[in-house]
Image: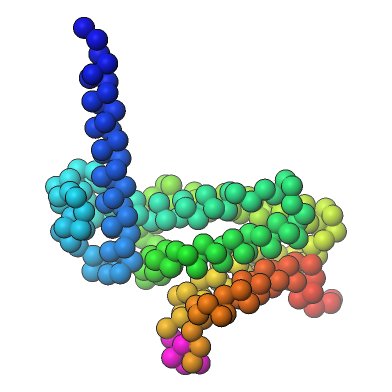
């Protein structure tokens, strides 16, 4: 007897399971970003998907594991975007500028990611620390920046003593602040940081800020 029908049925079940899991993650991402970890409800997430609370527990094992899975997916998407930079074929100055602008674009397009990071900081990264995937997810971007910095110093382009974590912090802080603080900043200074008319100027600012510092324009002489 041929096993073809059974194999096809198994493959279809797998695809259905993958689609269901992806849908749960998408809805959970929105709910955790909107309500926070404490405020989000598994019942509500189930009601907004084509599944049940029981199935959510089957796939993820509980609310905390679902939240961690959402964080893992969100951070993985950032790292995937960063990995598209062709460091080997870009001059160091252009490579670091490209990374800064790419980070800006990602944060601008994925504002719920900023909310999730803010929420996890409120929880002192207690959930992030429980994920081996997340704990190790900082390595790819710091490795990438280290390669750019090494190449820039070898070419004589970069003079600043910053390391990869410093540079990642500089880029992230500008891009993150613009989204995370848009409401308080707007109330205090009357400017919507995310308004379209400011976007290209801010995008240019973050790239040039990083380049200026690394090339020595922002370093005081000894």
Q: Is residue 72 left or right of residue 53?
A: right
| Quarter holding residue 162 | bottom right
Please state the total of marks drawn on the protein image: 0
Q: Position of residue 191 (x, y in %)?
A: 51, 88
Q: Position of residue 22 (x, y in %)?
A: 31, 47
Pick the front one: 161 or 22: 22
Residue 197 at least partly seen? yes
Q: Quadrant of residue 163?
A: bottom right
Q: On the rendered image, what quadrant is the C terminus found in?
A: bottom right
Quarter occupied by the N terminus = top left
Q: In percent of the image, x 51 and y 62: which residue is there?
A: 106
Query: Which one is in front, 128 or 172?
Result: 172
Q: Where is residue 58 shown, x and y percent of the image?
A: 19, 43
- The quadrant where residue 17 appears: top left
Q: Is residue 25 found inside the magenta-colored segment of the image?
A: no
Vertical order, 127 against 179 (above or below): above
x and y, in percent, of residue 200 in the image: 61, 74
What is the magenta segment's predominant secondary structure? helix
Left or right: where 135 falls relative to 34: right
- Left of 153 or right of it: where is 12? left
Start and end of the magenta stretch? 184-189
- Magenta span includes 185: yes
């Amino acid at each position: 007897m041929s096993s073809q029908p059974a194999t096809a049925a198994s493959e279809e079940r797998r695809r259905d399971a993958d689609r269901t899991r992806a849908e749960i993650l998408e809805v959970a991402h929105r709910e955790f970003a909107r309500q926070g970890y404490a405020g989000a409800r598994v019942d509500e997430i189930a009601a907004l998907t084509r599944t049940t609370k029981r199935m959510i527990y089957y796939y993820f094992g509980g609310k905390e594991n679902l939240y961690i899975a959402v964080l893992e997916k969100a951070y993985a998407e950032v790292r995937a975007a960063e990995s598209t930079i062709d460091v080997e074929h870009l001059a160091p100055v252009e490579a670091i500028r490209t990374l800064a602008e790419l980070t800006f674009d990602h944060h601008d397009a994925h504002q719920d990611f900023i909310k999730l990071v803010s929420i996890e900081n409120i929880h002192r990264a207690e959930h992030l620390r429980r994920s081996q995937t997340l704990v190790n997810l900082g390595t790819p971007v710091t490795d990438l920046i280290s390669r750019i910095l090494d190449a820039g110093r070898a070419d004589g382009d970069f003079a600043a003593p910053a390391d990869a974590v410093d540079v990642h912090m500089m880029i992230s802080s500008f891009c993150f602040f613009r989204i995370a603080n848009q409401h308080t900043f707007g109330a205090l200074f009357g400017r919507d940081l995310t308004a379209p008319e400011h976007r290209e100027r801010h995008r240019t600012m973050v790239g040039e800020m990083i380049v200026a510092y690394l090339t020595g324009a922002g370093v005081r002489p000894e």
